[in-house]
Image: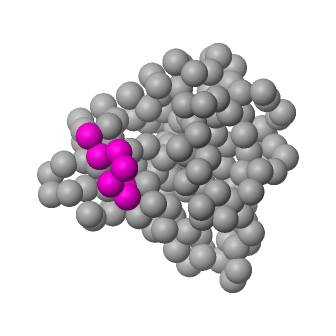
Amino acid sequence: MEIRIDDLSSPKIIELLREHLHSMTLHSPPESIHALDIDALRQPEITFWSVWDGSELMGCGAIKELDAQHGEIKSMRTASAHLRKGVAAALMRHILDEAQRRFYQRLSLETGSMEAFAPAHRLYASFGFQKCAPFADYVEDPYSIFMTKELVT
């Protein structure tokens, strides 16, 4: 499993992100979808990684720098063929290591509140994330759960 910074140009990553955005529409109304499209993921405050096994795309994820001390996890997605193989956990460790390297004091995320997101909730909780109030520009939303983790620097 190789995790590398991605420029979002590969047809495989474009398709995985399309799948990610489409799946959000199945579980949330449009005003409650906070997943970023490819253009938004190319912004300078975002670092995007993809996970590969040879030429096979396994997953992806990103950090958005909110400020010098706070990052947000974005676009965590495991390819359907690689679910329950530890892809998300490996990527989460990588993102946490990067957040530490950047001296962030906090890493936060927004995810859906519906049952379809339960595996994500369990993953984040297993890494010490706890529910919190909305952060950055988010507002309370019954379709969202906000989580955060204080980081030791």
Q: Is residue 86 magenta?
A: yes
Residue 6 in sight from this viewpoint: no
Picture layout, residue 128 above or below residue 52:
below
Residue 12, image x, y percentages: 24, 38
Picture layout, residue 58 above or below residue 23:
below
- Coloured how? one colour
Q: Number of numbered discs present?
A: 0
Quarter of the figure that contains the C terminus: bottom right
Residue 3, image x, y percentages: 33, 63
* Closer to the camera in the image, 12 or 39: 12
Q: Residue furthest left?
A: 55
Residue 124 in sight from this viewpoint: yes
Residue 29, image x, y percentages: 65, 16
6 relative position to 148: left or right: left
Picture layout, residue 122 above or below residue 116:
below
Q: Is residue 63 magenta?
A: no
Task: Say which residue appears at 70% left-offset and 73% top-offset.
Answer: 151
Task: Say which residue appears at 74% left-offset and 45% top-offset.
Answer: 146
Task: Say which residue appears at 39% left-offset and 35% top-offset.
Answer: 17
- Which segment did they paint magenta? 81-87
Quarter of the figure that contains the N terminus: bottom left
96 relative position to 149: left or right: left
Task: Say which residue appears at 47% left-offset and 25% top-offset.
Answer: 23
Q: Quadrant of residue 125?
A: bottom right
Residue 90, image x, y percentages: 41, 64
